[in-house]
Image (cartoon, rainbow, N blue to C red):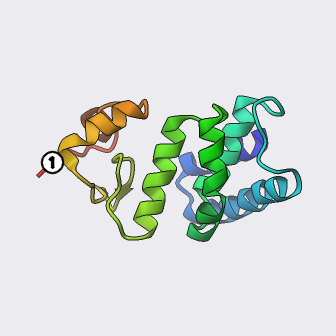
């Protein structure tokens, strides 16, 4: 699983899109294989780094895969095996997949914040999930937050 995490991040930092797709597919197959054969691991069985790699493999997989395994992600968050931040990022990604407004403001599309449900209260929701204020988050992308 450490290999999944390292290869995912190495490829994303290199900006080579063709490699992204190939690496995502390989990582997705490995993560699914583990979950299907052994079930969703817990921190009693694997390290935090390995749990993060499993989450990352699912986060960067297809819409169908995210949807299928999201209940297991929710359970892992409730059990403390994954973070609320990871839940928020995947939930927003899934809402974006469905063309719906995101809840936590974690998804960027074409250099802009993807549509957001109730933008005036987003920081309250982000705080509940342990996320930084939206204004600070968007600075990483050189995006100004405009709640209107």
For the residue pair 53 and 66, the one nearer the viewer reads as 66
Dot 1 surroundings within 10 Å: few (below 14), some, or many (20 or more)?
Answer: few
Reading the image, the residue beneath label 1 is: 147
Q: How many marks?
A: 1
Q: Can residue 22 be seen in this view?
A: yes
For the residue pair 123 and 16, the one nearer the viewer reads as 123
Which percent across, then down, holds residue 12?
Answer: 56, 50
Q: In the shown orientation, is residue 55 left or right of residue 132? A: right
For the residue pair 60 and 65, the one nearer the viewer reads as 65
Q: Is mark 1 on a helix, strand or loop?
A: loop
Q: Which residue lies at the image location 84% right of the left edge and 33% below the top edge? A: 45
Q: Is residue 10 visible?
A: no
| Quadrant of the snapshot with the N terminus | top right
Whether 26 is drawn above or below 90: the answer is: below
Q: Which residue lies at the image location 76% right of the left edge and 47% below the top edge? A: 40
Task: Residue 131: name its quadrant.
Answer: top left
Residue extending furthest toward the right: 37
Whether 127 is drawn above or below 99: the answer is: above
Which percent across, then down, holds residue 66?
Answer: 60, 61
Which percent across, then down, holds residue 23?
Answer: 69, 59
Q: In the shown orientation, is residue 95 left or right of residue 15? A: left
Q: In the shown orientation, is residue 14 left or right of residue 143? A: right
Q: Which residue lies at the image location 60% right of the left edge and 70% below the top edge? A: 64
Which percent across, then down, holds residue 123?
Answer: 27, 36
């Amino acid at each position: 699983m450490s290999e999944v995490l390292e290869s995912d991040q190495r490829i994303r930092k290199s900006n080579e899109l063709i490699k992204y797709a190939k690496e995502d597919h390989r990582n997705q197959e490995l993560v699914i294989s583990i979950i299907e054969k052994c079930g969703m691991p817990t921190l009693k069985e694997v390290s935090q780094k390995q749990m993060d790699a499993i989450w990352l493999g699912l986060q960067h997989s297809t819409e169908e895969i995210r949807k299928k395994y999201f209940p297991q992600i929710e359970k892992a968050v409730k059990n403390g095996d994954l973070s609320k931040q990871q839940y928020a990022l995947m939930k927003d990604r899934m809402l974006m997949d469905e063309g719906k407004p995101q809840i936590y403001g974690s998804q960027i599309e074409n250099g802009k914040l993807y549509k957001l449900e109730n933008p005036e209260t987003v920081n309250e929701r982000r705080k509940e999930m342990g996320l930084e204020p939206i204004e600070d988050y968007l600075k990483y992308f050189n995006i100004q937050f405009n709640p209107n």
